[in-house]
Image (cartoon, rainbow, N blue to C red):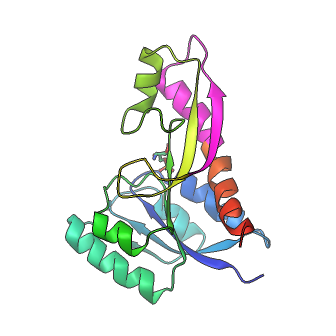
Amino acid sequence: MVKKRACVFISGSGTNLRSIIKNSREYNFPVNIKLVISNQKHADGINFAKKFSIPHIILNYNRTKFEKIATKLLLEKKINLLCLAGFMKVLSKKFIRNFKGNIINIHPSLLPKYKGLNTFNRVLSDGEKNTGCTVHFVEEKLDSGKIIVKKRVSINKDDSPEKLKKKVQIEEYKAYSIAIRKIYSKN
Ligand code: GRF
């Protein structure tokens, strides 16, 4: 099997990156991670790239400069799939158009519900019984592209935003890799 070439954009702890890296080491996983880009100098996730000897770079610049350098690297490294994993910069319409159909993201809610930030606080204050995570294609409109995978968790009465985040993240680690497998199982 010839594996596709993936890049992961991160901004923080990179625990989704870690789970994708681990799965990508299986021989029948459809992608290998060839590049990790962080827009934050101190993103802990960079340590996972280091640990697994994956090329990585920090691009702590404004959006225009970030996208210019990132685009060059994605083309040079012949990246097929760009995975956003806790990447907190909003990409420009132009950048998204350039890589359209090849950018995916993970969002901590059951989209289309609870787009945007602070999803855990909002689901709790609305008294929801369930929430979860969604992996979706990235479109120009925020958190709105075609959904690839959703995973649900139930909310308990005593769940705090922190507790809920932990429960949802356990599902995220499964969902991201299921989504990547699903994208390539059709081809
Ligand atoms: C995840 O919960 C994801 O849903 C959101 O940001 C968080 C990133 O966590 N977009 P990590 O950096 O993968 O640990």
> Quick one: 117 or 186, which is closer to the camera?
186
In the rendered image, the vertical position of residue 153 relative to residue 37, given as above or below: above
On the image, the x and y values in percent for residue 91 come to 32, 61
Specify whether residue 101 is painted magenta.
Answer: no
In the rendered image, the vertical position of residue 17 relative to residue 132, given as above or below: below
Q: Quadrant of the C terminus?
A: bottom right
> Quick one: 102 or 120, which is closer to the camera?
102
Q: Residue at x 65, y 72 (%)?
A: 31
> Quick one: 43 or 170, which is closer to the camera?
170
On the image, the x and y values in percent for residue 163 come to 54, 25
In the rendered image, the vertical position of residue 155 relative to residue 94, given as above or below: above
Specify whether residue 155 is painted magenta.
Answer: yes
Q: Is residue 110 visible?
A: yes
Q: Residue at x 38, y 75 (%)?
A: 98
Number of numbered callouts drawn: 0
Q: What's drawn in magenta, residue-wise? A: 147-171
- Point out the residue furthest to the top here: 157
On the image, the x and y values in percent for residue 60 come to 27, 66
On the image, the x and y values in percent for residue 73 come to 40, 82
In the rendered image, the vertical position of residue 181 relative to residue 14, given as above or below: below
State the image quarter where residue 18 is shown. bottom right
Horizontal side, residue 70 vs residue 174: left or right: left
Q: Residue at x 49, y 13 (%)?
A: 127
Horizontal side, residue 151 vs residue 103: left or right: right
State the image quarter where residue 25 is shown. bottom right
Q: Is residue 58 visible?
A: no
Q: Quadrant of the N terminus?
A: bottom right
